[in-house]
Amino acid sequence: MEINLKGHTAVVTGGTQGVGAAIAVCLARAGANIVLHGLNEDHHALETSQSCRSHGVEVRNIYFDLFNPIQDVMAAFRKVCLQSESPAPTLLVNNAGIFIDHPFLDMDEETFHRTFQVNVTVGYFLTQLLARHWVQNGVEGRVLFTGSINGLLAEPNHSAYDASKAAVAGMVRSLCVALAPNRIRINSMAPGLVRTPLTNQVLAQDPESLAWMQLHTPNGQVPGADVCGPMAAFLLSDLASHIHGQTMYVDGGMSIWQQPDLPNSLRTAR
C-alpha cells in the first residue's frame, strides 16, 4: 500500500534542516503541499524548499524565532495558515526543537524557559490553533510531534531537554484523549541519534562518541535523518487511521536495550 497525502497541506515547524527537512520532503513526495517554517532563509531552507517543490507540490515559507511572545508566534501562523488564499492545513508536524542545556547545577531560568517554549509550548498552542479551525469546519486533522529517545532515556547534562521531550510524550497522550472524539489524530515520532547538520559537527569532533553510540544501538547504525521521513508520513496517512496517542521510536532499537555486552577492550585480561 502506498502512502498518499495528495489533497493535504502540512505545516512543518523547524522544517528547513535535519529531521524536519527529512519529514517535509517525504510528505511532499507523498503529495502534500507544505508550509515550511524555519528560523532563517538560509541555504538549508532554500535546498529543502526546492526539494519539496521538485515533487510538484506548493511550498509556502515562514521564518521567525519561536521564542518570540507566544501570542506573536500564533498570530504569524494564523496569518500564513488560516488567513491566506491557499488551502488551510490539514496536517501539522510540531518538529521544531532546541538543545541548549547547561549542567543541572548551572542551569538558568531563561535557558530552561526557552527550551520549554520551543520544544513544548509552541506545539501545544499551534495544535490548539489548528484544532479549533478543524473542529469548526469538520476537518479530520492529523498532528505529529517530534519527540526524542531523550524523553525516555536520561543524560546527565540534558536535564531541561530530557524533561521537555518527556513532556511532549505526555502531551501527545493528553491531546489524543481531548481531540480523538473530534476525529483528530495525535501521535509522536521519537528518533534516536541521527545525522543532522548539528550532530554531524559533534560527531566529527568526537569519533569516540560515535563509536560509543553505535555500540549502544542494536543495529549498530547512526543513520541520516532521512530514516525519520517515512514514519512521519505513515503516521499522518490514512494507513495509520487507528493509531492514536502513541510515540513511535525510530532509534535502531536503542530504547529497548538495557545495555550492550561489555567490549573485549574493557575486559580485564585473564
Image: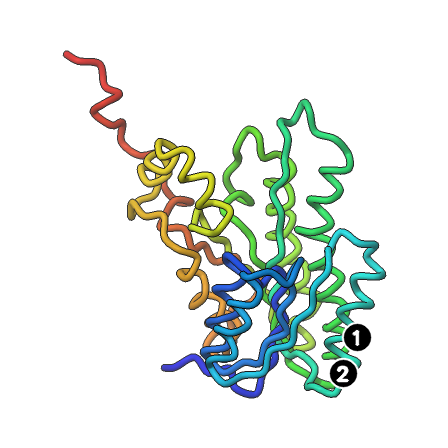
Q: Position of residue 139 (x, y in %)?
A: 68, 83
Q: Residue 246: image x %, image y %? A: 53, 60
Quadrant location of the N terminus?
bottom left
Q: Residue furthest left?
A: 270
- Give the quarter of the figure containing the C terminus: top left
**Residue lying at the far front of the rendered structure:** 43
Which residue shows up at 69% across the image and 51% down it? Answer: 118
Foreground residue among 248 and 263: 263
Q: Label 1, on which residue?
A: 79
Corner quadrant of residue 134: bottom right
Q: Which numbered disc, 1 or 2, marks the residue that appears first in the sequence? A: 1
> Identity of the amino acid at label 2?
Ser
Three-letter amino acid code of the residue under disc 1: Lys
Could you say whether the residue bearing mark 1 is in a helix, strand or loop?
A: helix
Q: CA distance from mark 1 to mark 2?
A: 7 Å
Give percent across and percent down for residue 193: 44, 46
Is 40 rendered above or below residue 62?
A: above
Tell me if label 1 and label 2 are in contact, CB under 8 Å: yes
Residue in view at x 79 percent, y 61 percent: 73
Q: Is residue 208 rendered to the left or right of residue 45?
A: left
The secondary structure type at the circle numbered 2 is: loop
Query: Crowding at label 1, few (<14), some or many (≥20) Cα neighbours within 10 Å?
Result: few
Residue 224 in view in this figure? yes
Image coords of residue 268 (percent x, y): 22, 14
Depth order, front residue of 33/159: 33
Q: Residue at x 69, y 44 (%)?
A: 115
Q: Which residue is mark 2?
A: 84
Residue 188 lies in quadrant: bottom right
Q: Is residue 246 in sight in this rendering?
A: no
159 left or right of 18 in image: right
Q: Nearer the viewer, residue 2 or 210?
A: 210
Question: Does residue 235 sit above or below 260 in this rendering?
Answer: below
